[in-house]
Image (cartoon, helix red, strand yellow):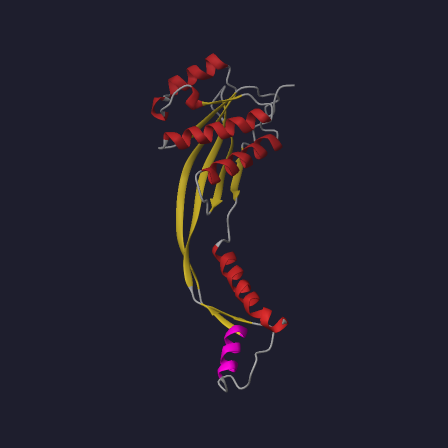
Amino acid sequence: MIQSCQRPLLGLVMLFAVLSLAACGGGTKFSGTWTNPEFAGMQEVDQVLVVAVADNDNSRRMFETELTNRLNKQGITAYPSVQFHDSIEQMAKDHIQRLIDENGIEAIIVTRLVDVNREEVYVPPSTYVSSYPSYGSPYYGSYYGYYSHGYSVSHSPGYSYEKVTVSLETNLYDASDEALIWSGQSNTFDPGSVQDVIGPTAQIIVEELVGRKLLHPKK
């Protein structure tokens, strides 16, 4: 009974091995960050403008909304730029300055797409050998020996899959003098959707800025 069960189990082992190779990667992380050494830290920040530079207005709206909501949950009042203008092309510098003055904006977060890298990855053929002995001997001595050997030694053909890396750059500016306070580039690996990029990226941005006290709410 144990020996008969090894056959489907070996097939499952092969399947999971192949799937794990195809699904490797994923996740979002910073590839690098920079902080202005002259920046001492904003003691209190209550008003932040969130700007996403994107050709797709829907993606822009989704990202700004996600990042704004996450900042609000940390007690920081943030406004998505899409709240003031639907099109990023209308956000001229003088208009942004007017928004800053009228709403008491203290900091600006700007995120833009840097690159979408697509790489074809080839996984070569491989052989999986069962830890259980084969039935029958020699290998070609009988039909049963040949049959059992097919379950104890199995071959996986080579295959290819596409590895995708989406890179975003995020900058934090002091609204009072336009000085760059912080910059970071994030990479999202093998996203299945736009939301797979937006959600995790917004999360690590907030964790970085709030965690390092580059932004923190008024008490």
Residue furthest to the right: 219
Residue 64 shown in magenta: no
Which region shows up in magenta?
Answer: 143-152
Residue nearest the observer in this picture, 147 or 179? 147
The quadrant of the rendering that contains the N terminus is bottom right
Residue 147 shown in magenta: yes
Secondary structure mostly seen in the magenta stretch: helix
Q: Where is residue 197 in the image (x, y as percent from the top left)?
A: 47, 39
Residue positioned 51% across, 29% down in the render: 67
Residue nearest the observer in this picture, 176 or 154? 154
Residue furthest to the front: 1
Residue positioned 40% across, 44% down in the render: 116
Q: Where is residue 104 in the image (x, y as percent from the top left)?
A: 51, 15
Query: Based on the displayed image, in which of its 4 quarters is residue 35 positioned?
Result: top right
Above or below: residue 182 compared with residue 104: below
Horizontal side, residue 116 vs residue 3: left or right? left
